[in-house]
Each structure stands twice: as structure tokens, then as C-alpha cells.
Image (spheres, helix red, strand yellow):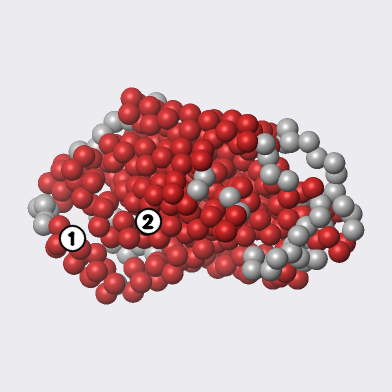
Amino acid sequence: MDHYLKNIIVVSFGFLLLFTAFGGLQSLQSSLNADEGLGVASLSIIYGALIISSVFIPSIVIKKIGCKWTIVASMCCYITYSIGNFYASWYTLIPTSMILGFGGAPLWAAKCTYLTVSGNRYAEKAGKVGKDIVNQYFGLFFLIFQSSGVWGNLISSLIFGQTPTSGYNASTSSYDHCGANDCPYLNITNETTTTTQPAKSLIYTLLGVYTGSGLLAVALISIFLDNIDLKRENEKDGSEEEPFWKKILATIRHLRDKRQCLLIPLTMFSGFEQGFLAGDYTKSYVTCTLGIHFVGYVMICFAATDAVCSLLFGKLSQYTGRVFLFYFAAVTNVACIITMLLWRPHPDQLAVFFVLPALWGMADAVWQTQTNGSQCTKSTPKCA
């Protein structure tokens, strides 16, 4: 196997194991820790901390310990969140959410750096276009990475599926406040058995599996991933190491480039749409109507479609261009949103619960692969 491809596969499977745990746990937060909005609050803290850490932490950490060990250290931050869920409270989830958030930015920055440098080095060695190889590497990464949603959600559904249920109340009035009509500030009680929380033993079993998956990810990266000498890249480009404050100013100066400014709302929307599906759709549509043990199965549809389309769009972009794919994803998202606003969810309409996340995953594959791959290289100074 090619040296570069081997490392991409190792990184991809490391993220697969890590996000099998975090992705499955994230999908359940709004339903599992619904009291006083604890689950949603913890997710908000995660992404708030991630935004702050994106400005200051990645460049410092990657410079000090390199891409490989940055990935390892950041993965350990993710594991603390799984451990915090063993006794979910404001005193455990909020601190571990902050730890995870501050570790998230270095993790993704190191991963993107690793894939981009590897792609450019291989392209230089093979005499190919750097942008195309980088896109293919990101496509392969997201094919493997997005499948984590399949395994993480399958694990949760199989474990929580052991909770006995007595069936659903077919009365339409029982679901009047599900879907777009769900309001967390109204004291509405659903009389069906779908609101029954899983047994504590099942929750602990699930968290144990998720924690073990995260530890395997750390072991895989630590043992099998080769480190990248970024100093060699700087020497090749003739660039010298700059003080930290100059890097901050250089980051701010990126805002002068309209392409960078246009990427910011795209990246933000990518987070918004994932958060909506994981937090609001799972709680207000799936758990409210079908039960918490259906959350995993519904999210598998999203993850599987996302994974397959990530590979497809990673290759397709070199023929269609990124702009066409962005339009396609935007139209798909808008169509799904309109459908969710008008749709009155009911257990008899089971197929709809799966079709919407599948379409959402197809659009998310575009946002993930194309925004991550939208970066300039030496051989492609005018990237989209």
C-alpha cells in the first residue's frame, strides 16, 4: 500500500472509532439529558468552546507537538465527555463539554493539515494536480468517517431496543405537539410510552462501549500513524517561523479575501444544519413520535447517505466544480426544511422519518467535503 494512502486510512479509522462514540452520544443528548435542557446546553458549550479555541489553540499545539500527537491529545478530550455522561449533571457535562470543545479545533485543524500536506506531497511525487488529490483524500476520509454515524447509532438502538415497550398510542391527538409544533417551553405531556427513559444499566452499558471505542481510536493513531515533518514544508516554501501574534494578525487578514469571507457562512451553516438534525429533529420528530430507541436507526440513514455521497462528491467536484454542488446542497436543505414545517409526524408515516435524514445527509456530504477541501495550494492558487 502507498505510504500516504496508509496514513490517510489510519487517520480515517481513528476518527471512525472516536466519532462512533461522540456522534452516537451527540444524537441522544437532547432526548437522554432533556431535563432543563442539559443535553442541548452541553452541545452548545461544545461548539461555543470550539469557536473560541479555533482562533488561538490549533497553531500553537500543532507547532509544539506536531499533527499526530495533536490528534492523539485532542481525542483524549473527546473521551472525557463520554466519561462525564456516566453521571450526567451540570457539574460533569458542562466542564467536559468545554474540554471537548477546546480539543475539537486542534483535532480538525491537525486532520486537515495532515490530509492536505499528504495530498500535495503525493501529487508532487506522482506528477498530478494537488487540488484533485486533496479532494480525493478528503472524499475517502469522509467516506470512512461518516460511517461512524452508522455504527454509533446502531449500537445505541440495539442497546436501548432492549427496553420493553407496550406499543404506541395511535391517536392523532397524542402527536399534535411533535415535529414543528414542539416547543420546549410548553408543559405538554405525551401520554405514550415513547417518553420512557432507558434503564440506567443500559445507559451505562452504552457509555462503556463508547468510552472503549474512543480509547481504541487513541491507541490506533498512537501506534500506526506516521508523523509529518511540517518544518520541511516551511523550508520547502522558503517560509520562516513567525511569532504567535503575527499568526493571529495573519488569520484576521484572511478576511480581506472575499473567498475566505464567503467560506465563513458556509462553514457556520454546516454546523447549524448538523446541530439541527442531531438536536431538534431527533427530539421533536423521532423521540416525540416513535421513541428514543428509534433515534439510532433514523440517524443511520443520515450517516450512511452522508458517507457514500462524501466519496461521490469528492470525485465529482473535479468535473462539476464546487459552486454547482453548493447550489445542489442548498436546494436540498431548503426542500427538507419546508417539508418539516408542513409535515405532521405520526408513527404510521414511518418511511418519512428515514427519507428526510437521508436527503439531509446527501446535502451534508457537500458541505463537509467541499468546505474542508476549499483551500489554496501552491499549484492551485485560484481555488474555489
Provide residue 347's location: percent of width, then percent of height.
82, 53
In the rendered structure, the answer to whether residue 153 lies left or right of residue 340 reads left
Image quarter of the N terminus: top left
Q: Which residue is mark 1?
A: 247
In the rendered structure, the answer to whether residue 345 lies left or right of residue 99 reads right
Provide residue 142's location: percent of width, then percent of height.
49, 45
Q: Which residue is mark 2?
A: 50
Q: Residues within 10 Å of mark 2 (few under 14, many from 20)?
A: many
Which residue is painted at 40% across and 60% down in the image?
Answer: 48
Q: Name the element at disc 2.
A: helix
The foreground one among 211 and 240 is 211
The foreground one among 233 and 249 is 249
Image marks 2 and 1: residues in contact by CB distance under 8 Å: no
Disc 2 from disc 1: Cα separation = 18 Å
Image quarter of the C terminus: bottom left
Classify 10 as above or below 123.
Answer: above
User: Quadrant of residue 35 in the image?
Assistant: bottom right
Classify 206 as above or below 320.
Answer: above
In the rendered structure, the answer to whether residue 288 lies left or right of residue 279 reads right
Q: Name the element at disc 1.
A: helix
Q: Is residue 244 visible?
A: yes
Which residue is painted at 21% across and 39% down in the image?
Answer: 65
Which residue is painted at 66% across and 43% down in the image?
Answer: 296
